Amino acid sequence: MADKVPDRFDFPKEEEKILELWKRLDAFQNCLKQSKDKPRYTFYDGPPFATGLPHYGHILAGTIKDIVTRYAHQSGFHVERRFGWDCHGLPVEYEIDKTLGLKTPDDVTKMGVAKYNAECRKIVMRYSEQWEEIVTRMGRWIDFKNDYKTMYPWFMESIWWVFKQMYDKGLVYRGYKVMPFSTGCHTPLSNFEAGQNYKDVSDPAVIVNFPLDEDPSVSVIAWTTTPWTLPSNLALCVHPNMNYVKVKDKSTDSVYIMMEDRLEALFKTQDEYIVLEKMTGESLEGKKYKPLFPYFESMKTNTDNTGAFRILTDTYVTAESGTGVVHQAPGFGEDDFRICLRYGIFKKGSAVICPVDPSGQFMPEVTDFAGQYVKDADKAITKLLKVNGRLVHQGTIKHSYPFCWRSETPLIYKAVPSWFVRVESLIEKLLKNNQKCYWVPEFVKDKRFHNWLKDARDWAISRNRYWGTPIPLWVSDDFEEVVCIGSIDELEKYSGVRVTDLHRENVDDITIPSIRGKGVLRRITEVFDCWFESGSMPYGQSHYPFENKKAFDANFPADFIAEGIDQTRGWFYTLLVVATALFDNPPYKNLIINGLVLASNGQKMSKRLKNYPDPVEIVNKFGADALRLYLINSPVVRAESLKFQEGGVKDVVKDVFLPWFNAYRFFMQNVTRLEKEEGVKFMSRPGFTPSNVMDCWILSFTQSLNMFVKEEMKMYRLYTVVPKLLKFIDQLTNWYVRFNRKRIKGDFGHDDCIQSLDTLFTVLYNMTLMMAPFTPFLTEHMYQSLRHYLPTNLDDSNASVHYMMIPKPRKDLVNKEIEESLSYMQRVIDLARYIRESKVLPVKYPLPEVVVVHRDPVCRKQLLSLKSYILEELNVKELSLVEDDSKYGVKLTAEPDNDRLGKRFKAEFKNISPAIKALTDKELREFQETGELSVMGHSMNREDIHLIYSVDAALSQYHAQSDGGFLVLLDITPSQEMVDEGIAREIINKIQKLRKKAGLQPSDQVDVLYKVTGSPEGEATLQRVISTHKDAIQTTTKGPLLSKTDDRSLNGLMAEEDQKMKGVSGVSLHLWILPPLSVASSSSGPAPKCRYINLEVYSKSLLYRKNFKSSLFLENPQGKNYLSFEDLQFEANLLLGIRVRRTLFLYTKSKEGIVIEVNESTDLLSLSGSTIFISDKELSCTDVVLPSVVVGPPYSPFIDIGLNGKSSSGSAWLENPVGHPIFKSKDSAKTVALKLLS
């Protein structure tokens, strides 16, 4: 049997219980075992570094991956999910360098590569336990035991194989190239790494003069934001086709040459200079100038067309910034390198002037600044230029500048020797393969990624580091002889040495004999860029092609991958490059890109700034399901940014989980009630077809949702699926359950109760299966209870919701007409609710009429079929459905859209606005039909004008609200009878809230006591309402409502509250909840389950029935059908055989032994177990003499009735009056009673 549902549900703690359940079941592994013979669904997990803790970006991507792979499993696939670790590269080395105080490559050399790598190995999995703990706590199912690590020898061997395929295809070469360079990590970075961490910084901006050799009084002036590159200046560059001018600075008499369009860079007004001459940039080509510094002056020659320190031309120069003259330092600029190489300032393959070491410090040849860090030298360089008369202007500029993503130091661009993959030759194939992939959202594929591929550069894959996969190239000293190794076996074949680990300390000393007489070949010192390893992970994780070749070939490319948008220049890119180079195929079929999770203020999340809450704290506070749903129901799944708000996670619990859980709890409570009160054990009926329209609607909606989810998940559109699922939870809780509470509680009979429970179960069960991939914990909790109501054996195969398949949609249940009808009803109800809210009229106060105006007769007919639901939900007495609103005095008025039209018409809007407001009802109704209108000669559409309904003052009781063809008019003038009914509803509401406060279940029997205090007029009003509506109150609250008397003890008090009553001024209602009043302790003998009273005659005129003794139930079954005073009069007349009904006078004793009269104001339930004495004449209580004890067991024999052998829920008299049998036997009594009770 299912466990009792708790009243207060602690989501995080319950999730921890589910984790224990999964651990006991070994659920993930069993899930994989169950699906092992099913079709494969391939998923690649991008490897994170374990040197840092997971952040929201990891959690978001992990959640997306978990949802998709869980859904794939539940759709009938076998989904292997292996966690991967990026173990090599800068993140690890940088930590070691900081810890050990290593500042230069020489420090590592002194320490030794073996020792250095041993230190790296120690910390590489520093946070792996925390990663596993957090990933598991988030509910993600992924295999940590069968993981892959990029440092595993078998993984590294596959990397060697990948590289050899590229090398054999001629895609690998060695060359000099200007690359982004991290001085903090002493290594070049790839272009996509350099683009990961831009920051806004202030840099110096200087203009420097370069006197011409032909006329030193004339200087060409250039602008730069990197003064530290000026000591390496070898040329100047101008645009050949743009105009340049020779100008005289009036303030200094200096003569400069600069671009005509850039005069503003030096002069504020035209009055500050005189133009002496105009020329094209082409005319300046070849002119020589005086070097800024003497360090490389020897590169200057006397001939016109050779050597350094001359003016060059290229069209990359722009008129956007600077002076239109760009200084050229080919060792520090990609374009500088290209242009100077083209002009022969240095030869291809030869070293280029680059006097900065890997730590970013000037080398000895720059004598004035040797040993200074380049960025720190800017000021000293500027100062020396000023001293030497070469500084024209000095300022600062704020711009975006790249920083190292690991060391947080500014990058420089530096010419370095490197090994490259020829990506540029693959561009057409990359673009073609990209088109074969399906991206969500698609714009990232077609714009951002396409543009990146289109402009892709050759990939520098070598790093001058230590902890990484060594590049398997053995070369001669002159690089003329090269051997590329692709496996451990191949290395042994060429070298005779067998290794088991491929890190540098194990392979660096291995040599290969030269076959060309060049001695021995030694391995180059570089290791692979770690992006090369992660881009090769599909092959590395399978040790391809050395193992698993058949399985890999059958399941490549992957069905699905997912990461953040920053990986368009990272993992997505490297995966595609490697797969295209190897197989000319994309490595993935489907890809989801998520956006970035930012701090609440829109800034990047920063540990230093502590501008975001710890993910672990969020999970401990609200649960993992809440965080998962918050993240995936946000713009971030559409590759947009999310400003993380803790309140958003809290809202998921409040607005989604609690209503959903309450619907589930309501079902469970009523299944318990059904079993407890009626002895019926609920069991679902798969395939049943409902007859109730609301049942048909919610089941149709469920099947439509199922079909929608299947289709959208097939297209990987989580951003459409999740909102739809959440909307469905709203439909279930706020519409279906709300509208059918009485049916589900059994108020309309057993059969209707079973049907509504079956419907609610079917919806909850289907919802649980559909939501399982999204909220794995809550759905598991619900499933563990719901599975007990399935007509199947409970075994290991269905022990978890995550073993279950997504149900196939039942198309026979889909009824679009009913779905449409209910959508109409919801719109009408929402409009009427809006009117109530705007007029501060709570729903508990009934109103006379709601009028719905709609022109479509089909729509009106559909609404008429739902009339009872509309009336009950809106608490109105009458529904009118009409086509024409004229008899209600409805008129249309117009309001302009101020923002929209204000922007469009600007100053003219002042005249247009009153003209719109003056439009007549007739004009606006025509506009309503056509959607077009002319105002003062300007065409208007529905977006420009808002239509407002107003009602004629003569019919002021109506208030209007409209939307999309529906006009709702609500009569807001309630009668006194309706006001009383509203007060009664408020009493019911207060009792129900107090029952909830006491922690009661719907089936729990209690007594509710009340006392009214306040003004005499208010007391009278409230007492009248209670008296008039007492039966309705008791029926709804399923318990007696008793006036608090002084003799009633408060022993066992469960809850108490004193509240002001709305609608009755100056009155308070005090409520107590107590256990039911039982038969007094002085009684002897058994008592029935239902409360009762005994009857005897008292007056002499009735002594012809002197032996008359009878009993009556005060309730039957328990908590239902309460006996009223009118019922008591009727039953007493009947039992006494009085043919012409007359008023009888009834007397009994209070607990204090005082004779009291029983009348309309008496709480009959408070007399449970007492004997009431009957007189046909009214007597004074002081004249009535009764026995000393009037409390005891029932006079009439009885049986208690239970269903299916369960606890009794009702009772039946066998004789009544005593001596007059009702049934032939107890069995026949039980048979008849069972029919009545069910």
Image (spheres, helix red, strand yellow):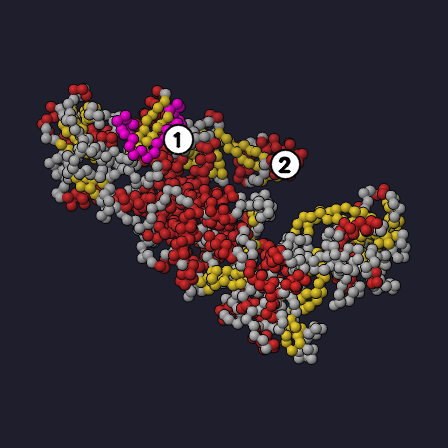
Report the quarter where the C terminus lies.
top left
Q: Nearer the viewer, residue 530 or 133?
A: 133
Q: Residue 902 has which mark?
A: 2
The x and y percentages for residue 904 are 64, 39
Residue at 86% x, 63% y: name it: 301
Question: Mark 1 falls on what kind of element?
Answer: loop
- Indicate the amino acid at tag 1: Tyr
Q: Earlier in the sequence, mark 1 or mark 2?
A: 1
Residue 796 can be seen in this image: yes
Q: Is residue 868 above or below residue 761?
A: above
State how far apart marks 1 and 2 are (Cα).
43 Å
Observer able to see residue 857 = no
In the displayed orientation, state which residue is furthest to the front: 110
Residue found at x 51% / y 55%: 131
Q: Magenta residues, as a range?
A: 1041-1067
Q: Main secondary structure of the magenta part?
A: loop
Amino acid carrying mark 2 in the image: Gly
- Between 174 and 933, the one lying in front of the other is 174
Tell me what residue is drawn at x 85 percent, y 43 percent. 272
Q: Position of residue 1221 (x, y in %)?
A: 12, 39
Q: Which residue is mark 1?
A: 845
1019 relative to 542 in the view: left or right:
left
Mark 2, other Cα within 10 Å: few <14 / some 14–19 / many ≥20? some
Is 204 included in the stretch rendered in magenta?
no
Residue 51 image point, x, y percent: 56, 56
Above or below, 1176 relative to 818: above
Q: Which mark is residue 574?
A: none
Q: Residues within 10 Å of mark 1 (few under 14, many from 20)?
A: many
